[in-house]
Image (spheres, rainbow, N blue to C red):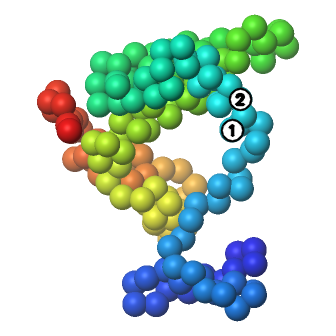
Amino acid sequence: MDQRDFDKRDGEDKFDFTSGASSSGRMPPYECLTLTFLRRCAFRMQLGLHYGKHNWKKGAEDKKFILERLAHAVEHLHKAMEQIDTDGKMVDDDLSAVAVNCMFAMEYQERYKLIARKQSEARLEHQGKQAERGLDLPEEGHTSPGLSSESSRTSPSNSRRG
């Protein structure tokens, strides 16, 4: 790892930096997200400010709202694919619309604990199993890293959480 060494002791993450400092709690590599991505998503969120700064959070536990956001994401993704395929001028920032609508759905998944465990751990475990078998393809019947077959079939109840 760049400028830090990872060490696992007694089940806890510990990082020893080249400076001699140590830290616990592994953080995801936020530096891998580009400023362009973050900026375009923020501008997309700005378009909805006339509804209220955090209006989308009112629907964060509403399955129908979230499914509608994902339908919007699919439409915007199709428009972005067409725009890129034809080298057309961008009329709307469709890819930022995809990203923020997916963000809403990710928040829904987190609220209802639809992700069984940390994605990074599940992905690393999945990659390890593939390497053991010498395969680059997902396991047959495998739904998604981090989701058990049971959790991928269940859905939260329609009751509101407080």
> In what quadrant of the picture does the N terminus appear?
bottom right
| Residue 105 place in picture, x, y as percent | 42, 32
Q: SS for tag 1?
A: helix
- Vertical order, 144 against 81 (above or below): below
Q: SS for tag 2?
A: helix
Q: Residue at x 65, y 55 (%)?
A: 30
Q: Determine which quarter of the picture holds residue 5.
A: bottom right
Q: Residue at x 61, y 17 (%)?
A: 47
Q: Residues within 10 Å of mark 2 (few under 14, many from 20)?
A: some
**How far apart are the two marked residues, 1 and 2, measured between alpha carbons?**
6 Å
Badge 2 is on which residue?
Answer: 40
In depth, the one of 141 and 116 nearer the eye is: 116
> In what quadrant of the picture does the C terminus appear?
top left
Specify the label residue 61 is tagged with: none
In depth, the one of 90 and 123 nearer the eye is: 90
In the picture provided, is 80 more to the left or to the right than 142?
right
| Residue 9 place in picture, x, y as percent | 46, 90
| Residue 113 place in picture, x, y as percent | 29, 47
Inspect this view and state whether residue 81 appears.
no
Inspect this view and state whether residue 2 appears.
yes
The amino acid marked with disc number 1 is Leu
- Vertical order, 99 against 140 (above or below): above
Specify the label residue 38 is tagged with: 1
Q: Residues within 10 Å of mark 1 (few under 14, many from 20)?
A: few
- Vertical order, 64 against 140 (above or below): above
